[in-house]
Image: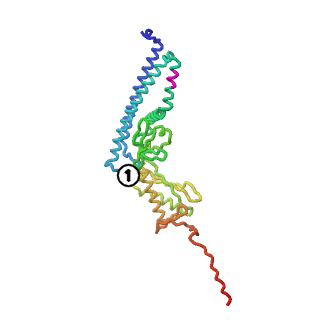
């Protein structure tokens, strides 16, 4: 029967192998999609926070609303991915199955077909294909998930949606940035929600050379303890990082349990440091915060306010 159709036994075995491998690959892809959907849904439901910064929201329950949007996005992402993966596997099977019969086509027709496909994929569909494969890579790696707090270049926010072609970030001021998945793959992304539960909230400040470093360290280590965002996982840490002509560079770090708490903890530490320096007259960068006023006074005032005037010589009285 195969000989009547012009199909050799070796070709029939090849087509059978392609069919079996394609079916197994399709089953594996569908199983992976189902498993990924379940894992992302479970991870999102366990999240205690979904905001990069704690802000007053016009929504009654922003966390529940964000979770509902995230679950809807996961369902949509899984559906779209399934619609891409299934035709992709079937198309790959069709191409592999057609390879033994390409020799029967005229060389000119084959060249035209290959050229047309190459031009279409290389020019017209390149951005879409590139972003689609990047989206599949993001879904496969699971390094960035819906609900994660990330830093992409200068964008700090929460991953609100991941589709096949783009990712939506909700930044701290509630704006939405639609980022192509290819950029997500090529850029350096800091994921604050990956693996570790706690985060270091670290700030940098400077003091002048004549400051009492022991006093500065003692005051700095007390600053995080007054913040409600501080987590007493371990005591705060203080480091002298550099000494330059303009002053002494210091770092202060403490633990927080969420990215939004780390943001608030940094604010509280900066505010408390300024207050402590003002109360104790500690100089920063050659300036001093006066205890009784909020004015910045330089220890070396410029003589610009003191205008020099030449003494006026008295006119000689005329001879009588």
Residue 98 colored in magenta in the image: no
x%, y% of residue 155?
46, 46
x%, y% of residue 206?
53, 58
Which one is in front, 271 or 309? Answer: 309
Direction from residue 161 to residue 116 in the image, left or right: right
- Residue extending farthest right: 319
The residue pinned by badge 1 equals 55
Which one is in front, 162 or 235? Answer: 162
Asked whether residue 257 appears in the rendered view, the answer is no
Which one is in front, 310 or 147? Answer: 310
Number of numbered markers: 1
x%, y% of residue 53?
40, 50
Characterize the magenta stretch by its predominant secondary structure.
helix
Quadrant position of the C terminus in the picture:
bottom right
- Residue at the image point whose x is 48% and y is 13% from the top: 10
x%, y% of residue 184?
47, 40
Label 1, secondary structure: give it: loop
Q: Which of the colour schemes (rainbow, by chain, secondary structure, one colour) is used? A: rainbow
- Residue extending farthest bottom: 320
Q: Is residue 306 above or below residue 79?
A: below
For the record, the magenta segment spans 110-115
Residue 114 colored in magenta in the image: yes
Q: Is residue 305 above or below residue 106?
A: below
Q: Is residue 9 above or below residue 299?
A: above
- Residue extending farthest left: 60
- Residue at the image point whose x is 40% and y is 40% from the top: 161
Q: Quadrant of residue 34?
A: top left
Quadrant position of the N terminus in the picture:
top left
């Amino acid at each position: 029967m195969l000989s009547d159709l012009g199909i050799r036994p070796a070709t029939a075995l090849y087509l059978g192998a392609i069919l079996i491998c394609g079916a197994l690959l399709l089953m594996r892809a569908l199983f992976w999609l189902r498993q990924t959907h379940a894992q992302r849904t479970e991870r999102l439901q366990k999240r205690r926070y979904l905001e990069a910064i704690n802000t007053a929201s016009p929504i009654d329950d922003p966390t529940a609303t964000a979770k509902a949007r995230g679950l809807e996005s996961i369902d949509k992402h899984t559906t779209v991915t399934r619609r891409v993966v299934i035709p992709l596997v079937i198309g790959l099977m069709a191409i592999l199955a057609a390879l033994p019969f390409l020799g029967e086509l005229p060389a000119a027709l084959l060249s035209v077909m290959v050229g047309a496909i190459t031009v279409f994929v290389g020019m017209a569909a390149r951005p879409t294909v590139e972003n689609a494969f990047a989206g599949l890579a993001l879904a496969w790696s699971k390094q960035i998930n819906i609900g994660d707090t990330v830093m992409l270049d200068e964008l700090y926010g929460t991953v609100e949606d991941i589709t096949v072609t783009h990712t939506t970030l909700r930044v701290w001021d509630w704006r939405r940035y639609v980022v192509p998945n290819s950029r997500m793959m090529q850029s350096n992304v800091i994921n604050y929600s990956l693996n570790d539960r706690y985060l270091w909230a670290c700030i940098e400040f400077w003091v002048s050379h004549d400051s009492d470093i022991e006093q500065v360290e003692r005051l700095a280590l007390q600053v995080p303890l007054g913040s409600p965002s501080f987590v007493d996982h371990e005591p705060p840490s203080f480091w002298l990082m550099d000494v330059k002509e303009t002053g002494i560079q210091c770092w202060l770090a403490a633990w927080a349990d969420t990215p939004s708490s780390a943001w608030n903890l940094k604010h509280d530490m900066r505010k408390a440091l300024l207050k402590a320096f003002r109360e104790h007259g500690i100089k920063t960068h050659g300036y001093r915060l006066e205890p009784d006023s909020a004015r910045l006074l330089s220890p070396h005032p410029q003589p610009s306010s003191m205008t020099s005037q030449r003494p006026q010589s008295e006119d000689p009285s005329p001879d009588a």
